[in-house]
Image (cartoon, rainbow, N blue to C red):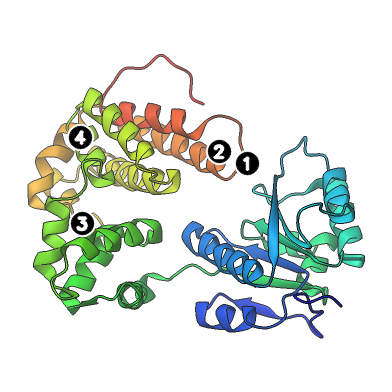
Amino acid sequence: MKGGLGRPSAFCLMKLNHAQLTKHLQGALAPVYVLSGDEHLLCQEAADSIRASARAQGFSEREVFDVDKSFDWGLLYQAGASLSLFADKRIIELRINSGKPGDQGASALLEYLSRPPEDTLLLISLPKLDGSTQKTKWAKALIENPASQFVQIWPVEAGQLPQWIRQRLAQAGLSASQEAVELIAARVEGNLLAAAQEIEKLKLLAVDGQIDASTVQTAVADSARYDVFGLIDAALNGQATHTQRMLEGLRGEGVETPVILWALARELRMLATIAQQVNQGMPLEKAFSSARPPVWDKRRPLVSKALQRHSAAGWNRLLQDAQRIDAQIKGQAAGDAWSALSRLALLLAGQRLSLPSE
């Protein structure tokens, strides 16, 4: 066989561990890699690692296919069968954001796995597959076929987040106090993309590679002009024009839609819960202190102002809008996620919109 691709002798289900994945990629590459999970940052970085290893082993050409309902699965056959004029080896990426290839797709995947082309590496990206999907013929083939390496991307649990942040800081050449790590963890609340962005900012502020609580607080105060947390504060404060400008700035700076949706949805969940509790007779101050995380004293005026804009039912409708945007981002619903995020942020800011939901 020409260099680069090997046929693993047995199926290996890997719980994502960058050290393990890196070690695996130093050897002969499998013909097919499948990444399955909902943690955007970890999926993205695993795919980057596979691509980098493939490039180092001579895979110099790359084709990317985004699968939707109208996708022509014949393209997979053609890409696998055709010879490249410019490269000996190539990567074909298949992004199945819905997690459902359909009947034609299932047949195409089974056919491909039965005879993986020489000198082609197929990289398939899927969301987390539920139990019933894992039992389908096509999914079982991806998981069990000796030609395929199925990588399950597990989320970082809340209790593991401080350690993940500490490791991420170390990779950036930084060390942090326990208080600093806890502050970062509290600020990002489980969102790894947001955590990675915070760490990038801290690299610019660190003195001799050291991060303490004051460094984190300075990063919060002196964050970039367009900051996702600043966006939330502008919306809570009812500054619709400023909110729109900040959202456009975030997009221009390359901030990912899942980060913005996470921040908006977190705030909407908190507002919906507090509005419901107040409706049921709980004093507002008690609702603030019982929120998880609690609403800090300095933010209570902002939150109080926002609570006046919608009823509890209204906040819940906005949460449903957020769920639709999540489906759009994952390719599971029609509509433009950025337009829908803009609408959601403006509604949070109290803008009266007659536009239909995306």
Camera-nearest residue between 67 and 356: 67
| Above or below, comparing residue 127 to residue 183 in the picture | above
Furthest-front residue in this view: 86
**Residue found at x 78% / y 66%:** 142
Disc 4 marks which residue? Answer: 234
In 3D space, how far apart are the residues under numbered discs 4 and 2 (Cα atoms)? 25 Å
Q: Position of residue 221 (x, y in %)?
A: 12, 51
- Contact (CB < 8 A) between labels 4 and 1? no
**Residue found at x 83% / y 44%:** 75
- Near mark 1 (Cα within 10 A), the count class, few <14, some 14-19 or many ≥20, is some
Furthest-top residue in this view: 354
Q: Can I make out residue 94 in this image?
A: no
Disc 2 marks which residue? Answer: 328
Image quadrant in which you'd find residue 133: bottom right
- Contact (CB < 8 A) between labels 2 and 1? yes
Which amino acid type is shown beneath numbered disc 4?
Answer: Ala
- Near mark 3 (Cα within 10 A), the count class, few <14, some 14-19 or many ≥20, is few
Sequence-wise, the earlier of marks 4 and 2 is 4
